[in-house]
Amino acid sequence: MKTESMNSAGFIRTGPASDEIKNLFSSIASKYDLANDIITFGMARRWRRNLVRWSSEGLSAIQRVLDCATGTGDIAFEFARTFQNAEVIGCDFCEPMLKVASNKITRKFTDAAEHIRFELADTMSLPYRDAQFDVSSIAYGIRNVKDVPQALAEMARVTRPGGYVMILETGVVENRFLRAFVHLHFQAVVPFLGGLISGRQSAYQYLQKSSSEFPSGDTFCDVLRSVNRFSKVEYRPLLGGASYIYRAQVR
Ligand SMILES: C[S@@+](CC[C@H](N)C(=O)[O-])C[C@H]1O[C@@H](n2cnc3c(N)ncnc32)[C@H](O)[C@@H]1O
């Protein structure tokens, strides 16, 4: 698979086509959760919880939530667990990932069955009406979409004015010692372990490469501002910048 790079406009990927991304996630869907837990030492779970918690600060009520690029649904389930009266939709364009998510409703999250559902949808062209959701989110998905500003604009469109677009994505660690450790982890350990667990080392090489090239912190906030749909953009670094949560309030 070709490596990812950004074009001169900044944030339209010139790397793998959407179909290649779908195939990549289809090929690792059944092992995705296990590999993720091992590779991140379970920290990604805590960071998803942080995203959900932060999304509720400043909003009086959360009744409808959309989790884009939901994959196996962990953010969607976290929203459903936290806001038990909310209707939660998780959407993704990769059917095998959604199948794993849907199976979890019957296996693990029966309590959520009444108010969570999963739907096939491309984040760059969401099949939802304007201003329907209090919060829309995307975790470790925005760096995989072909046109990042278009996906962000779509998320802003379906979120009501005053609501939040929440993003969790990998970043660059500020401290150079920690950065060297994290770099080594992603460069060597992630492809090795990911490959061992899923049988698809190339998929984890792509995931490592795409995260090392994606803008983070203030640079990603500039991308958010360029969409011209947000009144306020903030971020919180996690583990010194290994990942970031961004919160953008829709105008
Ligand atoms: C690394 S996984 C993240 C899954 C989940 N959000 C999580 O936190 O574990 C990336 C997901 O993004 C999805 N994806 C990538 N581009 C997409 C697009 N344009 N529209 C919808 N889903 C997309 C992939 O199918 C995959 O399930």
Image: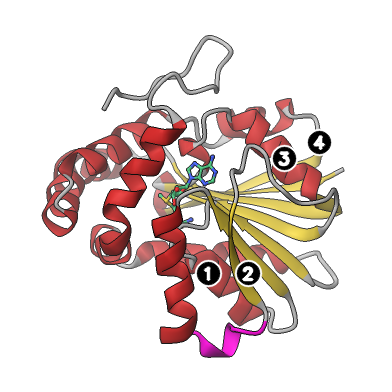
Instruction: Tell me the magenta residue range.
Output: 109-114
The residue tagged 4 is 229
Marks 1 and 2, Cα distance to the nearest angstrom?
6 Å
Image quarter in which the C terminus is found:
top right
Sequence-first disc among 1 and 3: 1
Image location of residue 211, percent across then percent down = 37, 37
Sequence-first disc among 4 and 1: 1
The residue tagged 3 is 154
**58 versus 227 height, above or below:** below
The residue tagged 2 is 53
Density class for disc 4 (Cα within 10 Å; few <14, some 14-19, many ≥20) is: some
Sequence-first disc among 3 and 2: 2
Image location of residue 80, percent across then percent down = 62, 77
> Quick one: 143 or 106, which is closer to the camera?
106
Lateral position of residue 103 relative to residue 159, left or right? left
Marks 4 and 1, Cα distance to the nearest angstrom?
25 Å
